Image (tube, helix red, strand yellow):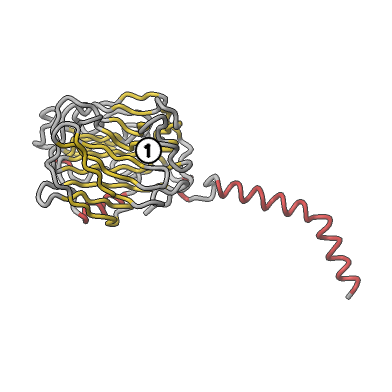
Amino acid sequence: MATKLQSAMEYLMTYGWAILIIAVVLGALFQLGIFNASTFTPKAPPGACHVFRPNGPMTTSFINLQGICNGELPQYVASFNGGASSQITTGINFALPATMSISFWIYLKNAPLSGGFNPFDQGLCNDFTATAWSDGSLYFYQSYSGCSYESLVMFPAGTFEPGKWMLITITRSASPKNVISYLNGALQNTATYVNAPAQVNNVQMTLGKGYTANSLYGYMSNMQVYNATLSANEITALYNEGIGGAPVKLNNLVGWWPLNGDAKDYSGNNKNGVTSAVTFTSNWESGYSTP
C-alpha cells in the first residue's frame, strides 16, 4: 500500500505542473470562445444581404431582400474603444414618427464608464435617445416642446452585464402612449409617456456615443430602425434569427446597419454611416450563443 501511495505521489510531483499548465491553457481557450461552435461557423461577408427597392429610396413597391439572408453569422462587428470620439454617425436626416422601433445587438467589455453612453441618440432636444448608465440600467429619453424631456426606465440596474451579447429592442407607440423594451426577444418593461414626442427634421442619429466623456466600450451589430411598432412575435422572430438576422418588416424599415465590416445602410434608403474611432473586428464570438 505504501509503495502504491509513494508511486502516486511521485507521479503527481513529476506531471502535476504539466497538468496544471494544460488546465490553464484550456481555460484561456474557453474564455476566448475557441470551443464555441459559432467560432467555426461560416461567416457572411460584408454586404452579403441587402434590401432592394426597385423604385428608389423610401419606396416600398416590390421591395425585397437580396443576397445571403438566412441569418448567417456576420464576419465582422463594430468595435467601439470607449473614447469620447468613438461613434458612428448614421445618415438618418428625418424625424421618426411617434410609432417606431429600434433593435440592435450589443456587447460590453466592461460596465459603462462614468457618465454612461448612448446606444442610439438623435441629438440634444431632437426627439429621442437611450442612455446606458454605469449601474447597468438603460433609460429612454424623448423630448417634447423643445428641450423638455421625459425619462423612462427601460431596463433596470444590472441588465447591461459585460461579457455577453444581448439583443435590445425598444418600441414606441402613439396610441396607447407606450414605450416597451425587450431583452433577447422577451418583454422587459412597458412605460407610459405623457407628452407627444417632438418632431425635428434633418437630424442625424449617432450610435455608441458617449453621454459625457466616454462612449461604448465594446461591440455593436445589426442596428435596425423602423417607423412602426414591431409586435412581440416579430421581436421574438428577430431574436431567433440571431445576430446576423435580416429585418422582419421591410415595408416599415427606414435604416439598417448590419455593421458587418462597414457602416453602410443596407435598407435601400442610402443612409450610410460615418465612423469615428470605430474599427471592425472578426474576433467577436465570445459571449454569443446561437438562439
> Which of the 4 image quarters holds residue 84?
top left
Q: Secondary structure at mark 1?
A: strand
> Which of the 4 image quarters holds residue 13?
bottom right
Q: What residue sits 39% from the left and 38% below the top? A: 116
User: How many badges with numbers are in the image?
Assistant: 1
Q: Position of residue 271 (x, y in %)?
A: 23, 27
Q: Position of residue 248 (x, y in %)?
A: 21, 46
Front-lying residue, 185 or 261: 185
Residue identifier under label 1:
220
How would you rate the neighbour count of disc 1 (Cα within 10 Å): few for under 14, some for 14-19, many for 20 or more?
many
Q: What residue sits 25% from the left and 47% below the top? A: 152
Lateral position of residue 139 relative to residue 60, left or right: right
Front-lying residue, 123 or 208: 123
Q: Position of residue 110 (x, y in %)?
A: 48, 42
Q: What residue sits 90% from the left and 73% below the top? A: 2
Quarter of the picture containing the C terminus is bottom left
Location of residue 61 with respect to 194 vertically, above or below: above
Lateral position of residue 149 relative to residue 207, left or right: left
Lateral position of residue 21 relative to residue 102, left or right: right
Quarter of the picture containing the N terminus is bottom right
Q: Position of residue 258 (x, y in %)?
A: 31, 36
Residue 251 in view of the camera = no
Q: What residue sits 21% from the left and 29% below the top? A: 92
Report the amino acid beneath label 1: Met
Q: Residue furthest bottom?
A: 1
Front-lying residue, 37 or 150: 150
Location of residue 214 with respect to 232 vertically, above or below: above
Lateral position of residue 171 relative to residue 168, left or right: left
